[in-house]
Amino acid sequence: MSNKRRYTHSFLLTVLLYAVVVSALVWGFTLTPVVKSISKEKTLSLKHVSLIEQEKKVIKQKSEPKEVQKPKEKIEPKPAIKPKKKRPKPIEKKQKQPQEKVKQKSKKEERKEQEAIKKSQKSYQEQFVDEHLRQIVMLIQKNIKYPKRARALKIQGKVIIEFVLLTSGEVRSIKAISGHRMLIKSSVLAIENASTAFPKVKEQLTLRVPIEYTLN
């Protein structure tokens, strides 16, 4: 009985092994055509992609215009310009002119000239005042009579009087500009008395003279 069991077991094992082998072979045969079809599809797709890329390149090459290379212009060398030789100009000999002897003016002459220029620029009234005002003041001072009351009160100082000197030598429009009132009347009388000795004028002038009152 034991031997029969062994035979049955071994028989069953061998049957199973044969069944496994047969099924593996069958499965292998069924897979091969599927794999071949997949590989064929992949090759076809790759070929299709490569064809599309080639077509795109051809279209691009047609669309892009080829650059026409211009023929290079030959640059001709310019002829060298020879520098012109400058002729030396003849040197003109300058004739020596005789130097004029300049006389040196003295200081007195220069002062006189300056004064003459100043006088020419000044008006007639300014010239008359510069030349004759001192003389007129001295003549008035000689004719002054000091008022007794002013002397007693010890009043002294300066009185400025304005008047118009006519061409006839007469004096008009005498008026006091400044000074003590007790000294003005005597100043007006002194001008009226001294006017006969005043220097004559070419035109009517308005003069202002200072008159000094001092107690000795």
Image: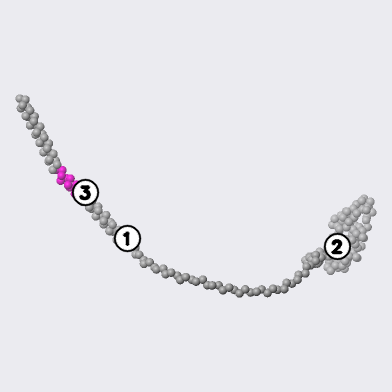
For mark 1, what is the residue?
Answer: 64
Q: Is residue 32 magenta?
A: yes
Q: Is residue 190 magenta?
A: no
The picture quadrant where one finds residue 59 is: bottom left
Q: Which residue is mark 3?
A: 42
- Using the rendered image of the protein, determine whether residue 61 is visible from the camera's viewpoint: yes
Q: Earlier in the sequence, mark 1 or mark 2?
A: 1
Name, please, the residue furthest toward the top: 1
- Our reading of the magenta stretch's main secondary structure is helix
Q: Which residues are magenta?
A: 30-41
Q: Residue at x 38, y 66 (%)?
A: 72
Q: Is residue 44 left or right of residue 114?
A: left
**Residue 133 position in % (x across, y down):** 85, 62
Label 3 element class = helix
Q: Find residue 133 and name its label.
A: 2
Which amino acid type corresponds to the residue marked 1 in the rendered image?
Glu
Q: Which sits earlier in the primary sequence, circle 3 or circle 2? A: 3
